């Protein structure tokens, strides 16, 4: 008998919680009522500014890279003492 009472009380509590959750859910607003607002504008403007700063920084770093040209030859050639003696 006590298990039946426990199950009935749990079901009543669950039913009450489902009712509260259903009431707490906001209805969907009309499309005319939805506006982006100032927070969205500030967020998008901040992301654009950060992207530009990162782009300029990357451009500056890429300009610092020294790439050997084909007509200059490669610097990977290792000279041995025999090669230096032959050059004299």
Image (cartoon, grey):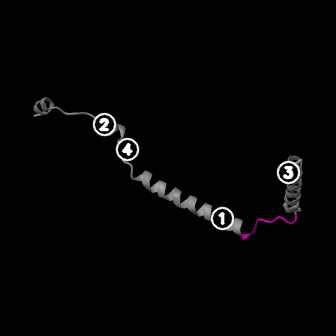
In the displayed structure, does residue 60 sit left or right of residue 69?
Answer: right
Mark 2 to mark 4: distance in Å? Answer: 10 Å
Depth check: give the residue in front, 30 or 63.
Answer: 30
Query: First in sequence: mark 2 or mark 4?
Result: 4
Q: Can you identify the residue that label 1 sits on?
A: 43
Kindly identify the residue that appears in the image at 30 percent across and 36 percent down: 74
In the displayed structure, does residue 80 sit left or right of residue 48?
Answer: left
In the displayed structure, does residue 40 sit left or right of residue 3?
Answer: left
38 w.r.t. 10: above or below: below
Quick one: SS at disc 1?
helix
Query: Badge 4: few (under 14), some or many (20 or more) residues near its Cα, within 10 Å?
Result: few
Q: Can you identify the residue that label 2 sits on?
A: 74
75 w.r.t. 46: above or below: above
In the displayed structure, does residue 9 sit left or right of residue 62?
Answer: right
Query: First in sequence: mark 4 or mark 1?
Result: 1
Quick one: SS at disc 4?
loop
- Where are the magenta residues, as a range? 32-38
Q: Can you identify the residue that label 4 sits on?
A: 67
């Amino acid at each position: 008998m006590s298990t039946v009472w426990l199950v009935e009380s749990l079901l009543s509590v669950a039913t009450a919680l489902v009712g509260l959750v259903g009431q707490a859910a906001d209805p969907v607003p009309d499309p005319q009522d939805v506006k982006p607002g100032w927070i969205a504008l500030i967020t998008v403007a901040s992301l654009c500014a950060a992207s530009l700063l990162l782009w300029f920084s990357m451009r500056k770093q890429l300009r610092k890279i020294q790439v050997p040209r084909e007509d200059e030859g490669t610097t990977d050639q290792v000279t041995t003492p025999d090669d230096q003696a032959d050059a004299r």
